[in-house]
C-alpha cells in the first residue's frame, strides 16, 4: 500500500538517505530504492558508511572499496555505482585537498594521527563521511565541481546509520560550522549543511510493524523535523498478509472458530486429527489475530505522521538480485510511476 506518494514534495530530490532500526532491512531497501531510481533510467551512486559490505552482499558482487565501482547495469541504460566510504581515506583526501599535505599526510597516518581523528575526535568521522557524499553530489561530467555541465550522478542513495543516530549524523556539520566559524572546515561544513537541509535531500525511514522499530521511527521523524531535515517516505518492510479474513480473525480473537469445521477440513486434507492438534491450531489462530491487531495499531501510528507509506512484502526466499527487483517495483511509484515498473522488469 502507498499513501499518496505522487504528491510527495521531495519527488525530485537528488540525495536519498535511508535509515531504520537494526534488523529492519535498511540496506535491502536502500538497494531497492537505488534500482528504482536507476530504472528511470539514471546513473545512481549507492553508498554505505558503516563498513559492513551490506551492498556487495545484496548484489552478490566483490566487496566495495573506496573507489566508485559499477555494480549493476540495466538493459534500459541505467546503472548503479557502489561505494563504501572509509573515514580514514576521506580524511587523507580532505587534508590533501585543502592543505596540500602530500607525504606529510602519510606520515600522520603512520604515527596514528589519522586513526585518532577518525575514531576519537567527536564528530570528525561523520563530517568526513558526509563530506565524501557531498563531493560526489557536486561533481560534474566535465570534471568540475560546479558549472552548467550535468552531474556525474542523477541521484545518490545513502545506506545511513540507524534511526537512533541519524539526527546526530546528519546535523554534525551544522555543529562543526558553529564551532569552526572561519576557514575551509567551516566553509565546507556550511555548504554540506545547506545541502542536507535543502529540497535536494530527503530521509526515508525503514521499519517493521513492531512496537520498538515503529517508536524509533516516530522519534526519528520528530528529531529530523526539529533539525530542519526532511523526512521522506516510511517504508514498512517484511509485511505478511493475514492468513485469515476479517471475520475469521474476529472469531479467532474471541476463541469462537468452529472446531467441527476445522476437523472436517483437516480430515479432507488427509491429516490425522487429534484434540491436541485442533486446540493447538486454535491457539495459533488466536495469536495470529492478536499479531494482526498489533500491526494495524502500529500502522495507524505511522499513518498519523502524514508521510507517504509503502509496504513491502516479506521475501520467503531471502534477499537476492531478483527479490531486489521485486521490491524496486513496489517502490517505483515513489519516484516516477509506471515507467520505472517497466524498466525494472526489463
Image (cartoon, helix red, strand yellow):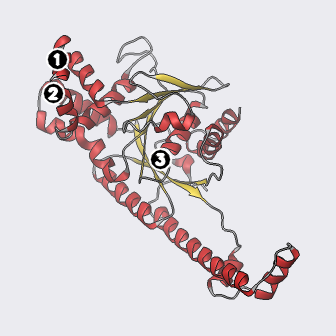
In the rendered structure, the answer to whether residue 166 lies left or right of residue 334 reads left
| Pair 3/1: label in front | 1
Using the image, determine if residue 184 lies above or below residue 307. above
Tell me the residue at 48%/43% (across/down): 27
For the residue pair 37 and 57, the one nearer the viewer reads as 57
According to the picture, the residue beneath numbered tag 1 turns out to be: 107
Local secondary structure at mark 3: helix
Marker disc for residue 252: none
Q: Which residue is mark 2?
A: 113
Mark toward the start of the polypeptide (2 vs 3): 3
Compared to residue 13, the image places residue 103 above or below, namely above
Give the image quarter of residue 97.
top left
Q: Nearer the viewer, mark 2 or mark 3?
A: 2
Secondary element under disc 2, as helix, strand or loop, is: helix
Classify 10 Å Cα crowding around label 2: few (below 14), some (14-19), many (20 and above).
Answer: few
Residue ID for mark 3: 26
Residue 110 is drawn in which quadrant?
top left
Q: Is residue 219 left or right of residue 336?
A: left
Q: CA distance from mark 2 to mark 3?
A: 33 Å
Asked where in the image residue 139 lies, by quadrant, the reply is: top left
Residue 85 image position (x, y, % from top left): 36, 30
Residue 279 sits above or below residue 115 on the image? below
Sequence-first disc among 3 and 1: 3
**Crowd tier of the residue under label 3, counting other residues whose Cα lies within 10 Å: few below 14, some 14–19, many 20 or above:** many
Residue 247 locus on image (x, y percent): 71, 79
**Residue sitting at x 17%, y 37%:** 176
The quarter of the rendered structure image containing the N terminus is bottom right
Instruction: Residue at 27% x, 20% y: name it.
Output: 93
Residue at mark 1 to residue at mark 2: CA–CA distance: 9 Å
Where residue 153 appears, x then y in whole percent?
47, 24
Q: Give whichever of 340, 293 is nearer the camera.
A: 293
Instruction: Please tell me whether residue 4 is drawn above or below residue 258 in the rendered image.
Output: above
Amino acid at each position: 500500500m502507498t499513501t499518496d506518494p505522487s504528491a510527495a514534495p521531495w519527488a525530485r530530490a537528488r540525495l536519498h538517505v535511508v535509515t531504520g532500526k537494526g534488523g529492519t532491512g535498511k540496506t535491502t531497501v536502500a538497494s531497492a530504492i537505488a534500482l528504482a531510481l536507476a530504472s528511470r533510467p539514471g546513473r545512481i551512486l549507492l553508498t554505505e558508511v558503516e563498513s559492513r559490505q551490506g551492498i556487495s552482499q545484496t548484489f552478490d558482487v566483490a566487496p566495495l572499496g573506496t573507489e566508485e565501482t559499477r555494480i549493476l547495469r540495466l538493459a534500459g541504460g541505467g546503472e548503479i555505482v557502489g561505494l563504501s566510504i572509509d573515514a580514514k581515506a576521506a580524511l587523507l583526501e580532505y587534508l590533501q585537498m585543502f592543505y596540500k599535505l602530500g607525504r606529510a599526510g602519510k606520515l600522520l597516518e603512520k604515527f596514528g594521527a589519522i586513526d585518532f581523528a577518525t575514531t576519537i575526535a567527536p564528530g570528525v568521522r561523520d563530517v568526513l563521511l558526509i563530506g565524501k557524499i557531498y563531493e560526489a553530489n557536486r561533481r560534474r561530467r566535465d570534471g568540475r565541481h560546479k558549472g552548467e555541465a550535468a552531474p556525474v550522478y542523477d541521484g545518490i542513495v545513502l545506506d545511513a546509520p540507524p534511526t537512533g543516530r541519524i539526527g546526530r549524523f546528519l546535523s554534525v556539520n551544522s555543529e562543526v560550522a558553529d564551532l569552526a566559524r572561519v576557514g575551509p572546515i567551516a566553509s565546507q561544513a556550511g555548504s554540506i549543511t545547506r545541502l542536507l537541509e535543502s529540497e535536494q535531500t530527503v530521509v526515508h525511514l525503514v521499519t517493521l510493524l513492531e512496537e520498538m522499530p515503529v517508536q524509533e521511527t516516530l522519534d526519528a521523524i520528530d528529531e529530523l523535523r526539529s533539525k530542519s531535515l526532511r523526512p521522506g517516505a516510511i517504508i514498512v518492510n517484511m509485511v505478511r498478509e493475514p492468513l485469515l479474513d476479517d471475520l475469521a480473525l474476529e472469531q479467532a480473537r474471541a476463541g469462537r472458530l468452529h472446531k467441527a469445521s476445522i476437523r472436517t477440513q483437516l480430515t479432507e486434507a488427509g491429516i490425522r486429527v487429534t484434540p491436541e492438534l485442533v486446540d493447538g491450531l486454535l491457539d495459533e489462530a488466536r495469536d495470529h489475530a492478536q499479531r494482526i491487531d498489533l500491526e494495524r495499531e502500529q500502522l495507524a501510528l505511522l499513518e498519523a505522521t502524514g508521510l507517504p507509506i509503502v509496504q513491502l512484502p516479506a521475501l520467503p526466499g531471502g534477499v537476492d538480485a531478483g527479490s531486489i527487483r521485486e521490491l524496486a517495483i513496489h517502490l517505483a511509484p515513489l519516484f516516477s510511476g509506471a515507467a520505472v515498473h517497466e524498466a525494472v522488469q526489463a
